[in-house]
Amino acid sequence: MHRLARSFYGLVALAPLLAWADWPQFRGPSQQGEVPAETKLPLTWSATEHVVWKAAIPGLGWSSPVVHQGKVFLSTAVSASGRQDDLPTVDRSLRALCLDAATGTILWDKEIFLQKGSDANRIHKKNSHASPTPLVHQDRVFFHFGPHGTACLELDGTLVWKVDSIQYSPVHGNGGSPVVVGDRLIFSCDGPPDPFVIALDLATGQQVWKTPRKTEATRKFSFCTPLLIGEGATQELILPGSGNIFAYDPKTGAEKWRCNWGEGYSVVPRPVFGHGLIFASSGYDQPVLYAVRPGGTGDVTKTNVAWMAKKGVPRNASFVLAGDHLFTVDDKGIGTCYVAASGEVKWQERLCSDTSASLLHHAGRIYALDEQGSCTVFAAGPEPKVLATNALGERALASMAVVQDDLLIRTEGHLFRIGE
């Protein structure tokens, strides 16, 4: 049964790679930071070399860029005073931006919500008021700002709908990005005391279902983005959170199974799937990497955990699979190569500075962008080998995106398009 499950789920996980045209969501079409081999991403660059364009982005936001039909979308939060380090009492304009992918020109810049300072949640120093990544689906783009609201726009910026009635109290601000499953937009609302996951109708923004996240963890806040695996009746929405990895039926919101990881909380990395296993980090304070077989009912902790690891596990950066290996870069820039099926560590060493952005895998290379705006490119193999180190010299927390053969890198003040 495990061999059959591995084969079936592996094929499903690769299915999104068959239709590459854009980069429509957080971590791309595969949901897992995979870039097709036929793409020719640059290996080396600097702040002045191989820069196709550099666009100034107003305000502050750590949402990652997404790409559709030659347009780049991202969100930002513009303070009423124009400063980036204002106290929470300052009003902010939560905005949606669209740039021309060829030139970097801002095509439109629209306020979606006005965040009153009196209603704003305090954020972590590594967060922003515009951190969830937008999502493009069937010529509409969805912008999510956590409890401050969610909106659907046409590609020209015309508002289709927006809702600001989904209330919860996030700790450290918003973070998790939405996903589309069928005709539903799904995202986590993991704030204490009652975290939940919710699905909205794509056409109207109306609530379809809402499921409580029942957890015994003391700290009930997290920031994870769901991962969809399987299809049809076997489809599972994998959404780690405080205390557990959860799997839901995306049609009904019913919990299918859970794997308990105790007091793990503030979960950020989006899980990845391959080799018949789901790989997820338990978050703070001491992250543990879990490799879990999907499927089952109820608490599967004792039956479905294939292996665990405690060293070099990231709290923030999502990992990547490349062939038989799983690669991670932790918060201090230490990279680890695991044998995906067994958890055997092939190598572990420091690659870069503190890292929050998720990894990319392309043609035998792993791209790791650190918080100083330096990207280390290393070989996706069982021996450690750094291929290039490329510095932009600006703070960077957002994950990279791909447009044609180029990289999109968001820094604190700019969006770069990097190419050959």
Image: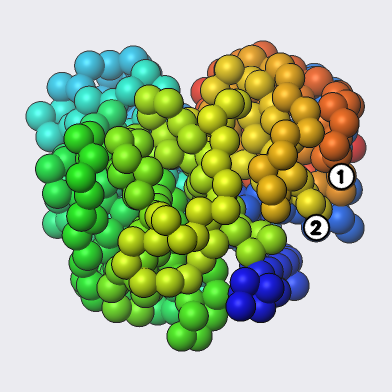
| Distance Cα–Cα, label 1 vs label 2 | 11 Å
Q: Residue at x 27, y 59 (%)?
A: 197
Q: How is the image coloured?
A: rainbow
Q: Is 234 in front, or is 395?
A: 234
**Circle 2 — which element?**
loop
**Residue 199 horizontal/vertical position (percent):** 30, 68
The crowd level at tag 2 (other Cα within 10 Å; few <14, some 14-19, many 20+) is: some
Q: Which residue is mark 1?
A: 364
Vertical relation: 35 (above or below) 48? below
Vertical relation: 182 (above or below) 260? below
Q: Which residue is mark 2?
A: 36
Vertical relation: 60 (above or below) 241? above
Three-letter residue code for mark 1: Gly
Q: Say if residue 158 shows up in the picture.
A: no
Q: Quadrant of the N terminus?
A: bottom right
**Residue 17 horizontal/vertical position (percent):** 72, 67
Vertical relation: 128 (above or below) 106? above
Q: Quadrant of the C terminus?
A: top right
Q: Is 256 in front, or is 61?
A: 256
Checking the image for residue 268, the label placed there is none
Q: Is 259 in front, or is 408?
A: 259
Drawn side of residue 64 relative to residue 367, left or right: left
Q: Say if residue 243 shows up in the picture.
A: yes
Q: Farthest residue in the front direction?
A: 302
Q: Farthest residue in the bottom direction?
A: 233
Q: Residue at x 69, y 61 (%)?
A: 275
**Circle 1 — which element?**
loop
Q: Is 106 in front, or is 42?
A: 42
Q: Earlier in the sequence, mark 1 or mark 2?
A: 2
